[in-house]
Image (cartoon, rainbow, N blue to C red):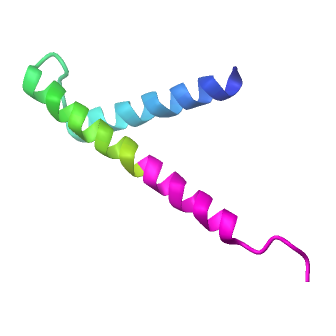
Amino acid sequence: MKIIMLVIIFLLVGAFFIISENSLHLNKTEELNKFTSLYFSWFGGVFDNLKQTTAYVVKMDWLPN
């Protein structure tokens, strides 16, 4: 349950940063569309970074010498 709450908080904080950095007003359709585009682009970047980090960790030699 705590992990789900942390993920939701992380996604909300990301959304708030996108809104504040771009001075978006979500009551306008064009700005809502821009927010949606920026948010999914950001979320895709987070997913790609997580994928790269996981691949790096898997490729590491974890056995002692």
* Residue 47 among those drawn in magenta: yes
Dominant secondary structure (helix, strand or loop) of the stretch shown in magenta: helix
Instruction: Work out whether residue 19 or residue 62 is closer to the camera in this orientation and state it.
Output: 62
Instruction: Specify the quadrant of the image occupied by residue 57.
Output: bottom right
> Going by the picture, which residue comes out furthest to the bottom?
65
Q: With 28 as the anchor, is 24 left or right in this view?
A: right
Q: Quadrant of the N terminus?
A: top right
- Residue 60: x, y in percent? 71, 72
In this view of the protein, which residue sits in the foreground, 62 or 20?
Answer: 62
The residue depicted at 91 percent of the width and 83 percent of the height is 65
Residue 3 position in % (x across, y down): 67, 29
Would you say 50 lies left or right of 44 here? right
Is residue 51 highlighted in magenta? yes
Q: Residue at x 8, y 27 (%)?
A: 30
Instruction: Determine the image quadrant of residue 5.
Output: top right
Q: Residue furthest top?
A: 27
Give the magenta part as a residue range: 46-65
- Left or right of 32 in this view: 54: right
Q: Where 65 sits versus 11, above or below? A: below
Residue 28, compared with residue 49, is above or below; it is: above
The answer to whether residue 62 is left or right of residue 27 is right
Residue at (36% x, 32% y) in the render: 15
**Residue at x-position 15% and y-position 16%:** 27
